[in-house]
Each structure stands twice: as structure tokens, then as C-alpha cells.
Amino acid sequence: MRLLVRVCLIATLLVCYVLLSCALEHEKRKSEEFQSHDKNAESNIKVMRNYTTANDGRHKAAAPKKKVKKTGSKRVSMGPKSDITCTRMGGICQSGRYICQGRYLKDKCSGAQTRQCCMPVAAWSVLCAGHHNNRVRACDAHGCGAFNSNRGNYLHKAVDLVCDDYGIVSAPFSGSLAGPVSRKEPTGNQFDGVKLVNDVHCVKIFNIRPYRYMGPVVQGEALGYLLPLQDRFSGITSHLELQMCDGTDPSPFI
């Protein structure tokens, strides 16, 4: 009887030992799996960080391109921010679909490109005494007086206005005389005159003898008298030469 009890006790201990060993083995496996999972997670995080860093580097490298684009966009020429350029010349900004009694000037008004500066007829006063308007010299044996007319090897970058010999020449607008001017043609002919400027306009008036070369003048004030051309150019129409300082066409103002 005692022997049977001992055998049962030993068997029970063996069973408990086996169960405990299995439990420990199971826990060990779970621990190893958990550790391997953590390692995989850490490696994934490192990969993500490296990817993010690489992308940041790419964005930083690409940043100057954006600056170049912005810099390039600044080169695009913009129109005037206000209409003051037009109004100071005596014009009015309006849509090009409306009728302008005078002439339209481009790039003088703010807003859409369809808005243009309408200059009234003869915004400047008559330059030559005894004439009712500023009449452009027609073609004669020595050429034509219109702007950009052909003068052989070059274009005429001025407008010739018909005047009488020794006739009084008046200021087309108020401003200041800015000294003598001179122009020489490729043929060797030289023409002298005076410069007249204000905040908006700058002109050179050739083939006149000014009374003075400096000082303020008002619109319509006598500047000098016309020099005759017949002694040098037989048969030519007597005229003065009106030239914008920037080489543009003065026709819209006369």
C-alpha cells in the first residue's frame, strides 16, 4: 500500500514537472517572437526616417528652382499701376471699344490692356505763328516730313511742321528750356535748336533761332523764330523739326 502511494506521488510530480517545462518553453517562445517583432518595427521606423530625410533633401535641392521661377515671373513687364501718366498728358483712360476723337496711346493706363489713353485732338498748341494747326510737311523734292518717312539710308525720327521763314515759333506746352541742341544728318547738314521739357514731355525743336536757351516758359509763349532753308535747299517747304527726346512719334500730341 505504501509503495502504491509513493508511485502515485512520484507520477504526480513528474506530470507537474512536464507541465511546468511546457509552460516555460511556451513563454520563452512568446518572448522571442515579441523581441523579433520589436526589431522589425524599429527597422521599419529607420527606413521611414531615411526615406523622409531623403525626401527632405530632394525638396531642399529643388527649392532654388522655385526661386528661379519666382525671379522669372518678376521679369514679366507689368503695365502702369495708375492712370496718372495718361492724365498728366491731358488724356483720359477708357476702353478701346469707345470712340476717341483724337488718338489712342498704348501702355499709359492701368488695368486691362484694352484700356488705352485717349488723347484729345491737338493736345499741344500750335507752334508756328500764322497757322491754325500743326500741319505736317508734305513730300517735296527733298523728302517728306512725316514721322518714320524714308530719308534714303535712314528713317526720319521726327515730324516737320510747316512754318513761314522768320515766323515766330511758340512753346507747344508749358515747361522749361533745357539748353541748345544740335543734329547732324549723314549727308553733313547740321540743324540747331532748343530743348523744351516738363514732368511729362521732352522735345527738341530744330531749325529755329531761340530768344533764350534756359528758363521757364508757358504754353503759347514765343520761343524764337524760324530759320530759312531756301538758301541751302532750293524748293524745300519751310518748316521746323519737332523731335521727341526718346525718339517716339510726337504726332499724337500735335
Image (spheres, rainbow, N blue to C red):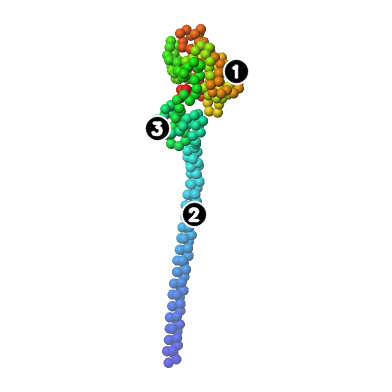
Q: Which residue is mark 3?
A: 98
Q: Position of residue 66 (x, y in %)?
A: 48, 42
Crowd tier of the residue under label 2, counting other residues whose Cα lies within 10 Å: few below 14, some 14–19, many 20 or above: few
Q: Which residue is mark 1?
A: 212
Q: Amino acid at mark 1?
A: Arg
Residue at 42% in and 14% down = 139
Q: Position of residue 149 (x, y in %)?
A: 43, 18
Q: Position of residue 129 (x, y in %)?
A: 51, 16
Give the label, 1 or 2, closer to the camera: 1
Residue at 47% in and 49% down = 55
Closer to the N terminus: mark 1 or mark 2?
Answer: 2
Closer to the N terminus: mark 1 or mark 3?
Answer: 3
Secondary element under disc 3, as helix, strand or loop, is loop
Residue at 48% in and 52% down = 52
Residue at 48% in and 47% down = 59
Badge 1 vs badge 3, beta-carbon distance below 8 Å: no
